[in-house]
Amino acid sequence: MKEEDINKCQIQEWYPKFKSISVKTRIHELPESFIQYLLDDSGPFLLPLSISNDDALPNRVHKPEEEEDLITLEGSEDEAEEPNPPPSFPELEMQIQESIETLGGAIFPKLNWSAPKDSAWISSTGNLKCTCFTEIALLLRSSDSIVHDLCHAYDSCVNKTSSRPPSLYLALRKWYPSLQPEMEFRCFVGNESLLGISQREVTNFYPSLLERKCDIKTMIEEFFEEKVKGNFRLENYTFDVYVTRDRRVKVLDFNPWGGSTLPLMFTWEELEERLREENELEFRIVESRCGIRPGLKTAVPYDYLDTSSGSGWDQFLRNADEQLRRQTSDTGAGA
């Protein structure tokens, strides 16, 4: 994998060409001062001072005892250090707030590649829904996942020359509260041919998918042929789609072929073999509760887990595959 392959999967690179068939998104280039704020772990956790006085944690409980280290006790000989003033990014905040309003008042954020999925727990809603700048800052500052974009974007590249892209962007994507996780799918493209489709949420069994499997496969295959094939600037890549209730297909994201992109219901060995032999398209879903992979529901975004050969996740996935084969064999033997 090369740096240029990774770069082509950045949202600000592909979205302008595919925006008519994707989720509504507004993209902002981040100033270096805000990037350094996200990277800074030298002092106490401080949220930016909002120009609109928005509170990212309106329901939090105030505990004065937690702030004792910032208070000078009366009669103390030593004066406590003055706490650093909270940072402020008024120009960026105004731009972001305008975009949020344009997108209907609620968005979920991501950087060039990654979303702060691992910090959803800290928000007042328990998910990535944001309605103001401070909520976005809270999610980004609390996330380990976005460190990938900030420091490790090119770690898997054979021609690595830097640790981060020259510019970092914040993508604000319209929030849709009614999205169904079972209708998101990952598509694998090799030599510009659609080789495989996998259910994206592999930690649950959805019986309704069994009834619609053939129909969904046809919709995604037609969508690829008409809208995606030849329009993305790589021959080998993956892309994620969402199938709506009214039978439309929307592009959600593009990811590199291999590396740290999870193959989900496939293995990369299988996909490489399909690439060499040019097999027909295969669509895989979780077809029973025995096929659920609960270990893949993690705090780390699916796209950037280390599943390389010899890694802990590589071994886990191999064990999960072996366990699934045993379960399937046992079920067949008992029938």
Image: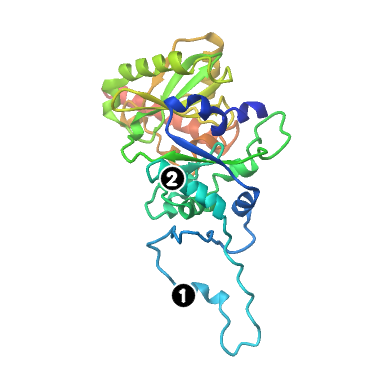
Image height check: is 120 above or below 327? below
Coloring applied to the structure: rainbow
Drawn side of residue 82 relative to residue 300, left or right? right
Drawn side of residue 20 relative to residue 84, left or right? left
Taking depth in this image into account, of 239 and 325 the one nearest to the observer is 239
Q: Quadrant of residue 162?
A: top right
Q: Residues within 10 Å of mark 2 (few under 14, many from 20)?
A: many
Query: In the rendered picture of this protein, how many numbered marks are placed on residues?
Result: 2
Question: Secondary structure beneath disc 2?
Answer: helix
The x, y position of residue 124, in whole percent, is: 39, 55
Q: Residues within 10 Å of mark 1 (few under 14, many from 20)?
A: few
Taking depth in this image into account, of 192 and 110 the one nearest to the observer is 110
Amino acid type, callout 1: Pro
The answer, for residue 1, to whether it is visible in the render is: no
The x, y position of residue 9, in whole percent, is: 57, 29
Quadrant occupied by the C terminus? top left
The x, y position of residue 194, in whole percent, is: 47, 15
At 54% from the left and 22% from the top, the residue drawn is 237
Query: Spatial distance from mark 1 to mark 2, Cα to Cα?
Result: 33 Å
Residue wearing tag 1 = 64
Amino acid type, callout 2: Ile
Residue wearing tag 2 = 100
Mark toward the viewer: 1 or 2: 2
At 56% from the left and 84% from the top, the residue drawn is 73
Quadrant occupied by the N terminus? top right
